Amino acid sequence: MKPFLIIIVLILILFIFWRFLYFFRNPTRTSQAAENAIISPADGYVLYIKYIRDLDEEVFSIKNERKILLHELILLRRSDIKFKSGWLIGIVMTPLDVHFNRAPIAGYIKRIGYEFPSVLRKNLNMFPALQNLFFNMDEPDKDCSYLIHNERASYIISNDKLQVFVTQIADQYVKKIVTYKDHVSISRGEVFGLIRMGSQVDLFIPDTGTPINVVTKLRAHVKAGIDVIAWY
């Protein structure tokens, strides 16, 4: 066999291994963090950490100076929101990351929203986010139109101490957002969903009176079910 054919065959074998085996790996993970830790819901890089002071405060301004509000991101009706402020943390998942998502706290999980683009409005590419992570130090979410455009599923996880919102955002090449846990109790670090291929997961921690101390850093790489995002 000629050398270039060997190289092509090896590339194909590596691609098949990544696409059908490595990408869908789901390693066993156990967090050793204290009970009051909020752990990462996803593997990936922290794209932004924003403190939202008011529900009518602009979260993103993507194109044409359009003002994007929090309830649009997490698929909640304005009338359903019982808080005024909180922390929003975005985690971009790369093709090398584990794509199973895990509960950041223990509690009751409920899917509160799902939105899928129409045939005429397909998912946008998340490449600008990865590009900004490494080359745009001032505006990591610049030109990230997918944040309010792409397929998404949103969940609330609550217990007697606090509640958090987790939003899965699909990439252009995602085949499907999969929900494994809905309307059931879930342990911290337990798998609740999967986003096939590329994706992002946002975590919103409302300020409801319980002090929150965010400890993760911008551009840090975190692992779902292990790394601490914040303390309450």
Image (cartoon, helix red, strand yellow):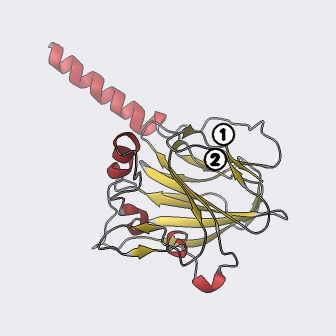
Residue beneath the point at 77% across and 39% down: 33
Q: Amino acid at mark 1?
A: Asp
- State the residue in front, 63 or 92: 63
Q: Which residue is mark 1?
A: 227
Horizontal and vertical percent position of residue 50 = 55, 59
Q: Secondary structure at mark 1?
A: loop
- State the residue in front, 11 or 70: 70
Residue beneath the point at 35% across and 53% down: 173
Q: Is residue 134 left or right of residue 32?
A: left
Residue beneath the point at 65% across and 82% down: 80
Q: Is residue 232 left or right of residue 23?
A: right
Horizontal and vertical percent position of residue 227 = 66, 39
Q: Secondary structure at mark 2?
A: loop
Q: Amino acid at mark 2?
A: Ser
Of pointers 2 and 1, the one earlier in the residue sequence: 2
Q: Which residue is mark 2?
A: 40
Cα–Cα span, label 2 and label 1: 6 Å
